[in-house]
Amino acid sequence: MEAKLATVEKIAIRVARNEHRKYSGMDVSPAPGLDASIGEAIETLSNVPFGAASTLSACAAITDVLKELEIKTCGYSGLMLPVIEDKVLAKRATEGRYTVQELLLYSSISGTGLDVIPLPGDTPKSLLAELLEDLAALSVKLSNKPLSARLFLIPGKNVGEMATFDNPYLTDCTVMSIE
């Protein structure tokens, strides 16, 4: 990974110099996509389904690799766990193998936060606020690490029901519970 990114970095530095721009680095967060699954990578490292014991240690191993790259980084440069942008993560959520709170735990070791999580459309604002308070507390305790929340409220759907998407970048997934 480092060799490939170093090549890209050299090009970016050259372009920045030629264009009289500042090169600030690159975000090395593994990009989500329906054709490439971070959930599958985590399962390969842990030898268990995502959400089982060893998931946290596999997330930590990926994070260590990202943090040890000898290139200039910017942005999150951390582990993304985009539930409805990853077929394996969506499948494991549908199987009930992990919770929203466990995703927050996995983010504590250098993740990007709570990413594209399908929630019931009628989730009370107070419950969303409590979840965001937990996310903010984690961010502060991790030395002001920026964490984001992309929570998808699915109108008309309840916990456990299937949310379907007519979007080539999203995959169907069961609606998750915050509680």
Image: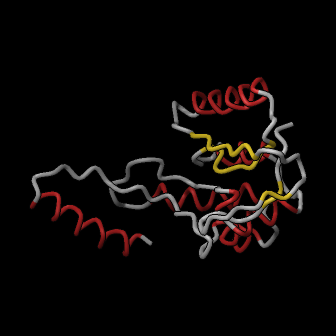
Whether residue 11 sits left or right of residue 41 in the image: it is left
Position in image of residue 175 (x %, y %): 82, 51
Q: Is residue 27 above or below residue 178?
A: below
Residue 153, located in which quarter of the rendered image?
Answer: top right
Q: Is residue 96 above or below residue 127?
A: below
Whether residue 107 sits left or right of residue 27 in the image: it is right
| Residue farthest along the top direction in this orientation | 126
Position in image of residue 98 (x %, y %): 83, 53
> Could you tell me which quadrant the C terminus lies in?
top right
User: Residue at image x 62%, y 44%?
Assistant: 150
Position in image of residue 69 (x %, y %): 42, 61
Residue 100, located in which quarter of the rendered image?
Answer: top right
User: Residue at image x 42%, y 55%?
Assistant: 27
Whether residue 169 sits left or right of residue 175 in the image: it is left
> Could you tell me which quadrant the N terminus lies in?
bottom left
User: Residue at image x 31%, y 54%?
Assistant: 25
Position in image of residue 101 (x %, y %): 78, 41
